[in-house]
Amino acid sequence: MSGTTLTPNVDGGLKSIKLKKVEMFDDISELPDCIISYIFTKLTIKDLLKTSILSKKWCKLWTLRRELYFDIFNVFEYTEQQLLQKGYLIDVTVHSTFSSTVERMLNLDISRDPFVKRVDQFLKHSHATIIDSFLVNFYLDSQQQSIIDEWIRFVIARGIGRMELLFCGSPYTLRNMPRKPYKFPFHLFPETNASTLKHLRLEYCVVSIPPNCNFIPFKNLSFLSLISVKVDGVFIQSLTQLEELHLIQCELKSLTLKIVSSSLRHLKVSLCYLLYGNFQKDVNLISLDCLKLISLDYGGRCSANMNFNTPMLNNIQLYVICSEQLLNAFRLLATLPKLEILQLDLYSMVPTSLKITHPLEHLKELNLIFIHPFDTPRKLEFDLSGILTILQASPLLQKLSVMLTFPEIIEDQKVARDVDTFSHEEVKVIELRGCVGNWYEIEFAMNVIKYANKLERIVLSPYWRDTVESVDWSSDLAWFQNGRQRITEKFQTEELVGREKLVLI
């Protein structure tokens, strides 16, 4: 056969193929199909097709690939810069009320038809008898309904286990472009084949069980993620074996969401809505009856009538807009006997008047993230002392992390105050991120050092999120370096026992 040289990447993939006429024993084509398919998974489509010219035996080996991934890079075989040069991507200036930004977008006029054609040709030439996973990530919609249906028909016939149809086209999503979403074809799934699908992720689709469907679709589906999907609640409730569910920016048919499941373990619900004419009204999660649920990420209103029957719930993330919702959240959280990890994304400060009547008896880790805390005319009133109320109500808390996004120096600095004496016997680590040396940051650090008896360290840092790189105390002399100096001077002048626990990074 014609010899090959496969150059491995650092991650174990195959980087390139060099072709040379060499007579040698063909070991690879003697391997089992499943191993050959795995090897071919490491190749791009372009390199995969090159293997067909190596020998007669290899002519159709590439068609055995069982994991199929199609996105703009994989299909066109170009880097982002090359896609720009070819015109598949374009930079567009987007104007808003206060600013203008340049966004990189797909040029559908020259990219969509070639993308669809290449995917279609690949599938038509495939001889795989089993397809394990199928992913398409591109800006597609109802205009491609019939051809996408054929793709799905193809993978269904081969026992598809994992399917992802990502038609928002991330990261090059087009804004405000009118189009009709792709309608997910339940009619293509006969009862026997629907049972093989275990993982389903859909973006920009319509999902609704047809009225003449006389069987439960996807009875073995364990993972379902719906993003920007118009979804029928009947479909969700029919998934009796579902273990993980994501509903993100979905259009639902009711203002209230109730979920009952004996199998669900992980749930994420965020920014779902009901459409009233041209207006969107927020959908609120009001009831959970999920005995096995262990994690919840809820980006919606925390209402007073929320009712959870979730005895195993261990990890929660909530978004809180105002003080009323914060109070509702703590009333709910106090009813959860297994809660150990809590994250609150806050759009206002924690009021010092907050009354937590029932303690969070099992909470061990608390993360508080203040979202744009200074986008308010009352920013001079901002402080962190209300957090101490939550600390007192969490007797077993071991780690407290506070993050201030987009930190800002307050010009009129107040004097740090001593709060009412309290004692905490468990908390060992406290982090304050987005710290730039304001009076309320110093006040917070002073008080927790005084009253947290088992505290091992308190970390103050200007880093406010993981994605920010090369930000340290010397990045901006007006903010970070001067802030660090203010903190250092304050703690040097105070007769404060335990100040050696302070860590500035």
Image: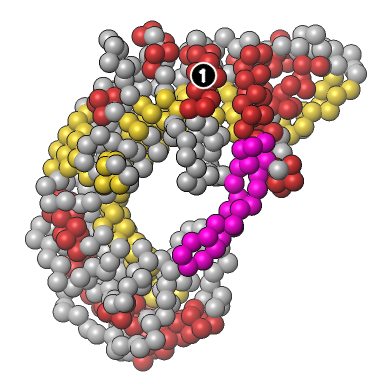
* In the foreground, 88 or 305: 88
Based on the displayed image, in which of its 4 quarters is residue 496 positioned?
bottom left
Residue 323 position in % (x across, y down): 19, 64
8 relative to 298, above or below: above
Whether residue 91 is visible to the viewer of this picture, yes or no, is yes
Image mark count:
1
Residue 48 position in % (x across, y down): 71, 23
Task: Describe the element under mark 1 as helix, strand or loop.
Answer: helix
Q: Is residue 98 magenta?
A: yes
Q: Is residue 216 left or right of residue 206?
A: left
Q: Is residue 417 left or right of residue 358?
A: right
State whether the magenta stretch is mostly helix, strand or loop.
strand
Residue type beneath disc 1 = Ser
Q: Residue at x 51, y 19 (%)?
A: 146
Crowd band around label 1 with a 10 angstrom C-alpha radius: few (<14), some (14–19), many (20+): few
Q: Residue at x 16, y 78 (%)?
A: 421
Locate the N terminus by quadrant: top right
Q: Which residue is mark 1?
A: 146
The part of the chain drawn in magenta is: 88-110
Residue 344 position in % (x across, y down): 29, 57
* In the foreground, 497 or 249: 249
Q: Residue at x 22, y 48 (%)?
A: 339
Q: Residue at x 76, y 20 (%)?
A: 51
Residue 320 position in % (x across, y down): 26, 57
* In the foreground, 392 or 150: 150
